[in-house]
Image (tube, rainbow, N blue to C red):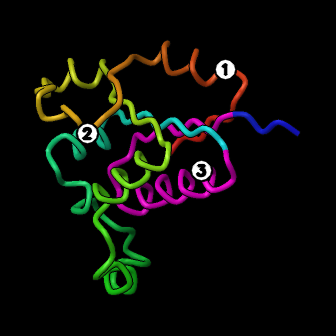
Amino acid sequence: MDSGSLNILVISGARDRLITAANLAASALALGRAVNMFLTWEAMSRFADGTLDRGPLPDTVAETAAGALAGQPSLEAMLQSLRESGLTLYACSNTIQMVGLDTTALTNRVDGISGAAAFLAMAAGGQIVSL
């Protein structure tokens, strides 16, 4: 069975969702799948300003998760490592424009800047997960 690409649409800046996105990407890459990640809205804003690891954790796990996350690589480092393993990382052009982000902050940190239509075209035939 051809499982196609995994295309992860990351909207939330909450750390649990960002960690889940990275975990899904790592798992799919390990299975030999092509993986595209499209950062938009709060996830894109946090990525651009370097605050991915400052996103909130759900109250139900905040205390135990914070301890477990101590000493782990930062989300930024995880994404860079995933890119080196084959993840293609995209920044949402619409979010950049609407929020007024400076694209120089993204130089060498993303593989491309694209809109939703381009993301959907790229994801055609693959699986889309939204977090």
Residue drawn at 38 percent across, 46 percent down: 12
SS category of the residue bearing label 1: loop
Position of 11 with respect to 53 (left or right) is right
Marks 1 and 2, the one that precedes in the sequence: 2
Residue 56: image quadrant is bottom left
Give the crowd class for mark 3: few <14, some 14-19, many >=20 residues within 10 Å.
Answer: some
Q: Which residue is mark 1?
A: 124
Q: Whole-percent x and y of residue 63?
A: 33, 84
The residue located at (17%, 50%) in the rendering is 50
39 or 2, which is in the foreground?
A: 2
Q: Is residue 29 above or below residue 71?
A: above
State the residue position of label 2: 109
Question: In the figure, 34 relative to 122: above or below?
Answer: below
Q: Which residue is mark 3?
A: 29
Earlier in the chain: of badge 1 and badge 3, it is: 3
Q: Amino acid at mark 1?
A: Ala
Depth order, front residue of 29/68: 29
Q: Residue at x 59, y 50 (%)?
A: 29
